[in-house]
């Protein structure tokens, strides 16, 4: 008998596998069926010469109104694997693989492979399906030693029909083992939503079960043994049968579907599958559940809101959907909006949203100032403001939608000092503020430009280009600086003032009034039109006042105002006293000058 060797050396037996987990979920008017066949000509326990075929066929026979939604192909066998097969002559390459190794003195490898063949099966529809080119022949001599030489294939076909009730259908897969050493296996099926257990059913795709081995072999769901006699007795669940075709000649594989209406309760969100085996070596590859589940499934999305510089008020145009649901979403379903983890607004759906329907809405929220410029904008439907909802849904894990947001802010800048230059007359001045082009910026990547007015700065017009020799015709004059962050399109404005001061005049103390155009007058640079109320006195060397001038008289040309007859002052040294009559210069300036004729 098969595995008698295993029985004697069970203490050396080890096995490795991949846990069964949810692969896909369907919500709506869906059901499923299995199509497949073994490649063993007879059960391997009874083979005198080990043999496994390379092809076999099975028939898909859906009703007229059944529409194929998805089709998943699984194939398996002894050995390390053959992952390129043909389905009805079309090459199929595995996109997911599973493996298991049984160690009992030496290693016995097993494999399973998966491919999504929905497009091909939809195109073919009902009819005969043949899997070919699955070759495990090189592994037969080894596996025949413990009667584990096998191969087979199966299609899990999910279909919809408008006459079906609203169901939730889950497909779980992996590769887990129950055997003599590991004589129990617990598999928890999560993501269930049992609203009504009427006509609930569960299907198993399993490999390597034997009809002739029934030592403590049971299948339980939520602690209750399930069976389907006479095809699947309570003490021999995995016995090479196909409950869709009622065949007991599906050698070393099982395609079995059980009604579990009385073994699962309304409100359950998970189910515990328990398998035991005192001798048989069984590998579970896929489990499918179908539960009557009339529930909505709220989801929310929104496009990135329009951003404006320095504006923390956002308009969110959101969309609430009820796709892939089995019931309408009620009105007044709460929606909460977050900036990171801070609640910034709330809303409610306005109408009942039907299956596959949607509703749009708009809300304006203000981002608090303590939220940084970069944050996650989150919308969570069916959320009362603390993460909990009021609607029983197919899934509560898809209610949240999040987008990263970078608020737009004007660039920072360094303050600029006013610039003071000498008054060139009537408060005119020449200024150099070229260094400010760089020093005003806190980011070298920003652009700084200069303008005569705020309007020009706002409109980016009439830019001041000559920064190192700028003439201000009148002061004080305000210069506007625009700092642009060209990445986000925001800008800042700042100003500084151009100021003039009355600088001390420069006296040119040589006079030669010969009308040659050079030094014909006593010239003092920076005096006229600056010190408007100045008074200038010229004295000879004996202290006699010869001439008095002010802003209304021309410069002294060497003539005396207080001399009878010839009023030409003779060549020589003279002295001046200059009263600027300016608060910055309370004391007069004095010095000498030289007159040459």
Image (cartoon, rainbow, N blue to C red):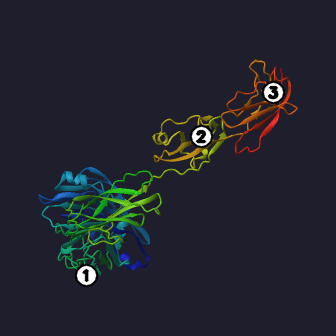
Locate residue 240, reporting x and y percent: 24, 70
The image shows residue 90 at horizontal and vertical percentages of 26, 50
- Quadrant location, the C terminus: top right
Q: Nearer the viewer, mark 3 or mark 2?
A: 3
253 vs 536, nearest the viewer: 536
Badge 3 element: strand
Q: Secondary structure at mark 1?
A: strand
**Which numbered disc flags the more N-terminal residue, 3 or 1?**
1
Q: Is residue 76 visible?
A: yes
Q: Nearer the viewer, mark 3 or mark 1?
A: 3
Alpha carbons under labels 1 and 2: distance apart: 97 Å
In the rendered image, which residue does mark 1 sit on? 224
Secondary structure type for disc 2 = loop
Dot 3 or dot 2: first in sequence order is 2
Q: Quadrant of the N terminus?
A: bottom left
Q: How much space separates mark 3 and mark 1, taking CA atoms?
A: 124 Å
Instruction: Say above or below: 578 vs 277.
Output: above
Q: In the picture provided, is 151 more to the left or to the right than 520? A: left
Q: Pointer 2: what residue?
A: 475
Whichever of labels 1 and 2 marks the residue nearer the N terminus, that label is 1
User: In the image shown, does 307 or 528 lie closer to the viewer?
Assistant: 528
In this rendering, the label closer to the viewer, 1 or 2: 2
Front residue of this view, candidates 517 and 188 = 517
List the residue tagged with mark 3.
510
């Amino acid at each position: 008998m098969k595995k008698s060797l295993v029985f004697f050396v069970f203490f050396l037996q080890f096995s490795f596998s991949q846990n069964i987990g949810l692969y896909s979920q369907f919500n709506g008017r869906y059901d499923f069926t299995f199509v497949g066949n073994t490649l063993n000509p007879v059960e391997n326990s009874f083979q005198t010469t080990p043999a496994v075929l390379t092809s076999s066929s099975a028939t898909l026979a859906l009703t007229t109104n059944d529409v194929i939604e998805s089709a998943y192909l699984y194939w398996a066998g002894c050995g390390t694997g053959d992952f390129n097969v043909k389905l009805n002559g079309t090459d199929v390459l595995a996109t997911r693989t599973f493996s298991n190794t049984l160690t009992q003195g030496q290693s016995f490898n097993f494999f399973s492979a998966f491919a999504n063949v929905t497009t091909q099966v939809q195109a073919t529809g009902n009819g005969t399906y043949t899997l070919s080119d699955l070759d495990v022949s090189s592994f037969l001599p080894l596996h025949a030693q413990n009667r584990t030489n096998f191969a087979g294939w199966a299609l899990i076909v999910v279909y919809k029909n408008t006459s079906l009730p609203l169901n939730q259908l889950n497909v779980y897969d992996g590769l887990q083992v129950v055997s003599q050493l590991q004589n129990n296996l617990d598999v928890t099926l999560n993501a269930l939503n049992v609203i009504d257990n009427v006509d609930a059913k569960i299907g198993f795709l399993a490999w390597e079960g034997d009809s002739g081995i029934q030592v403590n072999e049971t299948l339980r769901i939520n602690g209750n043994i399930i069976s389907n006699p006479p095809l699947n007795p309570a003490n021999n669940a995995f016995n090479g049968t196909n409950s869709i075709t009622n065949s007991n000649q599906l050698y070393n594989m099982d395609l079995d579907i059980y009604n579990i209406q009385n073994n699962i309760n309304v409100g359950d969100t998970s189910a515990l599958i328990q398998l035991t085996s005192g001798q048989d070596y069984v590998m579970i590859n896929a489990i499918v559940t179908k539960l009557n589940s009339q529930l909505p499934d709220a989801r929310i999305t929104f496009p990135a809101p329009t951003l404006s510089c320095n504006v923390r008020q956002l308009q969110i145009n959101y969309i609430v959907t009820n796709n892939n649901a089995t019931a309408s979403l009620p009105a007044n379903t709460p929606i909460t909006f977050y900036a990171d983890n801070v609640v910034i607004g709330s809303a409610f759906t306005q109408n009942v949203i039907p299956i596959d329907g949607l509703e749009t809405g708009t809300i304006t929220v203000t981002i608090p100032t303590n939220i940084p410029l970069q944050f996650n904008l989150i919308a969570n439907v069916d959320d009362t403001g603390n993460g909990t909802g009021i609607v029983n849904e197919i899934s509560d894990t898809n209610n949240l939608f999040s987008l990263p947001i970078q608020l737009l802010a004007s660039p920072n800048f360094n303050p600029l000092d006013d610039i003071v230059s000498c008054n060139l007359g009537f408060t005119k001045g020449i200024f150099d503020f070229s260094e400010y082009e760089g020093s005003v910026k806190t980011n070298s990547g920003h652009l700084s430009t200069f303008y005569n007015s705020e309007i020009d700065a706002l409109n980016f017009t009439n830019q001041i280009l000559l920064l190192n020799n700028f003439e201000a015709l009148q002061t004080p004059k305000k210069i506007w600086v625009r700092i642009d962050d060209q990445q986000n399109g925001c800008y800042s404005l700042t100003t500084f003032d151009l100021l003039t001061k009355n600088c001390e005049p420069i006296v040119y103390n040589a006079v030669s009034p010969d009308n040659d155009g050079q030094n014909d007058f006593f010239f003092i640079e920076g005096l006229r039109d600056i010190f408007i109320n100045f008074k200038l006195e010229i004295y000879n060397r004996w202290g006699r006042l010869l001439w008095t001038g002010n802003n209304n008289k021309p410069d002294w040309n060497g003539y005396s105002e207080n001399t009878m007859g010839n009023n030409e002052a003779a060549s020589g040294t003279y002295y001046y006293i200059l009263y600027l009559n300016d608060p910055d210069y309370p004391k007069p300036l004095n010095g000498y000058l030289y007159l040459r004729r």
